[in-house]
Amino acid sequence: MNLKDKILTELEKEPKSIEELELITNKKANNIQSRISELRNEGYDISLEVLKIKKYVLVQKDNATIISDFIKDNNLFMCKISLTALAKEISIPLDDIKLAIGKLMVLNKYKIIQYNPDVVLFKKY
């Protein structure tokens, strides 16, 4: 299969960038661009467009994950933990800490024992 046919086959599948066509064909950009020009001259309507591609982006961890990671990383299982001290340690407001602890309780990720409004204990299941 010649380069023009390969380019045409790939573009029929889905839009491709010049870099993607270089990887697929093992040819340089100027060679690919020349073949695209030839295809256009032969009557193919090929345009270069900016396409937006949706990608998943981790903006930030949620507070429940931050707390869970902190407990695991510092091996704080079976230790009484002050929520006020935890809030200061990981720089999350106390009310948000309480909400996140509640989320962890609902998720049944850990057995969480509440001793009083400020002290909890995490147990592994």
Image (cartoon, grey):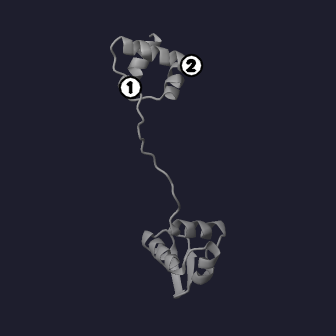
- Dividing the picture into quadrants, the one containing residue 73 is bottom right
Does residue 103 appear to the left or right of 45 in the view shown?
right
Residue 59 against residue 73 in the figure, above or below: above
The residue nearer to you, when weighing 40 against 65, is 40
Identified by mark 1, the residue type is Ser
- Closer to the observer: label 2 or label 1? 1
Residue that numbered label 1 is attached to:
47
SS category of the residue bearing label 1: loop
Residue that numbered label 2 is attached to:
28
Q: Earlier in the sequence, mark 2 or mark 1?
A: 2
Q: Residue furthest bottom?
A: 116
What's the residue at 42%, 41% (across, down)? 53
- Dividing the picture into quadrants, the one containing residue 118 is bottom right
What's the residue at 41%, 37% (across, down)? 51
Quadrant where the N terminus lies?
top left
Q: Position of residue 72 (x, y in %)?
A: 61, 67
Q: Which mark is residue 17?
A: none
Q: Position of residue 27 (x, y in %)?
A: 55, 18
Disc 1 packing (10 Å; few <14; some 14–19; many ≥20)? few
The residue nearer to you, when weighing 70 against 121, is 70
Disc 2 to disc 1, C-alpha distance: 19 Å
The residue nearer to you, when weighing 34 against 8, is 34
- Dividing the picture into quadrants, the one containing residue 89 is bottom right
What's the residue at 46%, 74% (across, down)? 105
Q: Position of residue 69 (x, y in %)?
A: 59, 65
Q: Position of residue 83 (x, y in %)?
A: 57, 81
Q: Residue furthest right?
A: 74
What's the residue at 66%, 69% (across, down)? 74
Identified by mark 2, the residue type is Lys
Does residue 21 appear to the left or right of 82 in the view shown?
left
